[in-house]
Image (cartoon, rainbow, N blue to C red):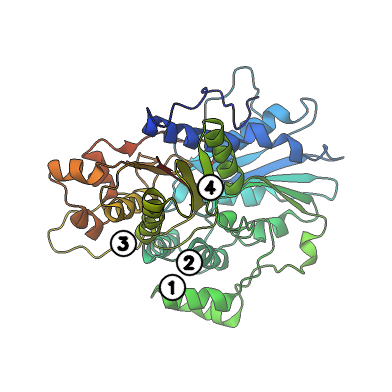
Amino acid sequence: MTTASTPAFGPAPDPREAPRAFLEHLYRVAVDRALPLSTLGAHLPPPPKGRTLVLGAGKAGGSMVHALEALWPADAPLSGLVVTRYDHIPPRPEGLPQRIEIVEAAHPVPDAAGQQAAERILALTKGLTADDLVLCLISGGGSSLLVLPAEGLTLADKQRINKQLLESGANIGEMNCVRKHLSRIKGGRLAAACAPARVVTLTISDVPGDDPAVIASGPTVPDATTCADALAILDRYGIEVPAPVRARLESGELETPKPDDAVFKGHETHMIATPQQSLEAAARAAREAGMEAHILSDEMEGESREVGKVHAALARAVAHRGEPFARPCVILSGGETTVTIRPRQPGQAKGRGGRAGEFCMGLAGALMGQPQVWALAADTDGIDGVEDNAGAFVTPDTLARATAAGKKLSDHLDRNDAYGYFDAIGDLFVTGPTNTNVNDFRALLVL
């Protein structure tokens, strides 16, 4: 097993000779730290007297299943169902028997496959006893993958509401509050369905603050938010729900199980990987390469392009004055920023991109070609939004090369088209699915 600072892909490139390769190395180290095979074993309970049922959802679901199958005693019964995103099932390790079914569904907007998976998962809880153990494998993306609309809602309703939330600029806590109250499986309801079996949740955090009630909308943990909170969020962003469903929210009929509910007695939740752990691994790797490293926060939220501008101001201060950090150094941050989709003008092409690319556009514009500053922003799941890239690079000549390619930054910002902007200059960062997910990764190198 490799450690975070000495991963299987070798030592760090020289940051002065190969800054882009160095930044990519830090990203790979961060992702390596969050892979389930390295982290899951320390949190496994012993096999129960009865049977062990495995349920779960998330973009890391496939790799979590493989890790569990490898680590669980070969003579102990193990079965279940986990849903992950399309094309996110890693190759099965040679010689590893399959004991848990893995299915695929859509993310970030749910589809019928996700609904079918959720229905099957809920059905598997029937007949559980106090002698049984339910292991729940939960990671980011589970909110969309585990879709089971509340009575009175259709899948089409959930798809519309989900899409509107994604485009509204709402943060992940707000989005998942709504999702929990419009679901028959989220917000602790899956745990309630497992009673009287013991539930142990193993989760990979992709949210600021590592709150298990927010990760994948907390299907197995208590929910402290209320129907009133969900209504306030829907009203804040102008998102409509069918009148009968709104009435059920107003009456509290769609309330979720709360922290004092006896159904959660004896349950456990273990955080097997977090954004902070991955940032710390990247910082160690940078220091081993001779660079001072500073972690700003693993909980950064806000409009992506604005967060990019703040990072640019910090990098420029370091480059010009050596404050608040001496150069050369690496500045790291994580969290989950948001993108508010701008209205398109008539005839304007639709933009492509996600949080990382939007951050990079804001960063590049505010850096204004600052010498000796390189950056990489990418999603640790390998997918920026719904595109095929993980993120993008920013270099001292990003603006100049884009201008030479006929690309105007303000035009791409106006239509949220980070993909088109960075693709034109060869600065998209493409990894494919990483089989884990600890949210945004941002690294700035100031030489």
Q: Amino acid at mark 2?
A: Leu
Of the 4 image quadrants, the one containing the C terminus is top left
Q: Nearer the viewer, mark 1 or mark 4?
A: 4
Q: CA distance from mark 1 to mark 4?
A: 44 Å
Nearest to the eye among marks 1 and 2: give it.
1
Q: Which badge, 1 or 2, is on the more N-terminal residue?
A: 2
Q: Residues within 10 Å of mark 1 (few under 14, many from 20)?
A: some
SS under mark 2: loop
Which of pointers 3 and 1 indicates the residue nearer the eye? Answer: 3
Q: Which residue is mark 4?
A: 294
Amino acid type for the residue under numbered disc 4: His
Q: Which residue is mark 1?
A: 241
> In screen coordinates, is 214 left or right of 400?
right
Task: For mark 1, give the secondary structure.
Answer: loop
Quick one: label 2, few (<14), some, or many (20+) residues within 10 Å? some
Looking at the image, which is closer to me, 303 or 433?
303
Viewer-closest of 92 and 281 = 281
